[in-house]
Image (spheres, rainbow, N blue to C red):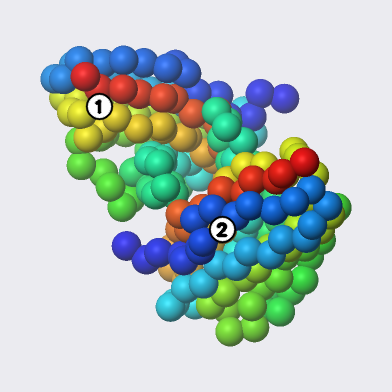
Amino acid sequence: NAGVTQTPKFRILKIGQSMTLQCTQDMNHNYMYWYRQDPGMGLKLIYYSVGAGITDKGEVPNGYNVSRSTTEDFPLRLELAAPSQTSVYFCASSRTTEAFFGQGTRLTVV
Amino acid sequence: GQQLNQSPQSMFIQEGEDVSMNCTSSSIFNTWLWYKQDPGEGPVLLIALYKAGELTSNGRLTAQFGITRKDSFLNISASIPSDVGIYFCAGTRTGANSKLTFGKGITLSVRP
């Protein structure tokens, strides 16, 4: 049972570099989400998607981009990494409300 | 953005004790969910609530959807060391398209 799979688990980026966080789910869920988690701050929604080809901004979208070309995949792109993007990133998917989360990607920008 | 309020930020209890934590909002929520996060892992769904007044159990965990639809609580009975973790409440509002709003979480420590 793979569920939601995120890669990589850890990454260190230099300021100004770019990278893509990968997320795939095998539950045929229409809804997918990207959250970031900072210590003591809960989870903040970055972007979400209600189905292939449809994406929308969440609470904290600046500095990020997403695409949803298939039901399974929802990659998150950082174009110009900044120290403020140091965080733990979680991808999630749901059929309706009950979201299932991946194990997270811990990103450090130095 | 709309926040769900969880306090205190940390709780310390003795193994075997019961603990209750609540989650409040100034807005009405249609769904309440409780998640637990272990260190280095993603949040895992514990209980989902869909109707005002609903009371649902999952083993030693019990959660209720407040009748005003602006709060929910989670109770853990007879705590054990593996209950340690961060407990998040989350909810959806009308028109939110299944987007979850999360509280900041409560870190629970259980002393053996």
Query: Can residue B57 be seen at all in this image of the molecule?
Result: yes
- Which numbered tag is attached to residue B89? 2
Q: Nearer the viewer, residue A98 or B103?
A: B103
Crowding around mark 1 (Cα neighbors within 10 Å: few <14, some 14 to 19, many 20+) is some
Q: CA distance from mark 1 to mark 2?
A: 28 Å
Task: Give left or right: position of A107 versus A2.
Answer: left
Three-letter amino acid code at disc 2?
Cys
**Mark in front: 1 vs 2:** 2
Q: Using the image, name the chain to which the residue with label 2 belongs.
A: B
Quarter location, residue B85: top right
Three-letter amino acid code at disc 1?
Leu
Query: Can residue B99 be seen at all in this image of the molecule?
Result: no
Quadrant where the N terminus of chain B lies?
bottom left
Q: Which residue is mark 1?
A: A78
Question: Where is A85 relative to B97, above or below?
Answer: above
**Are dots 1 and 2 in contact, CB under 8 Å?**
no
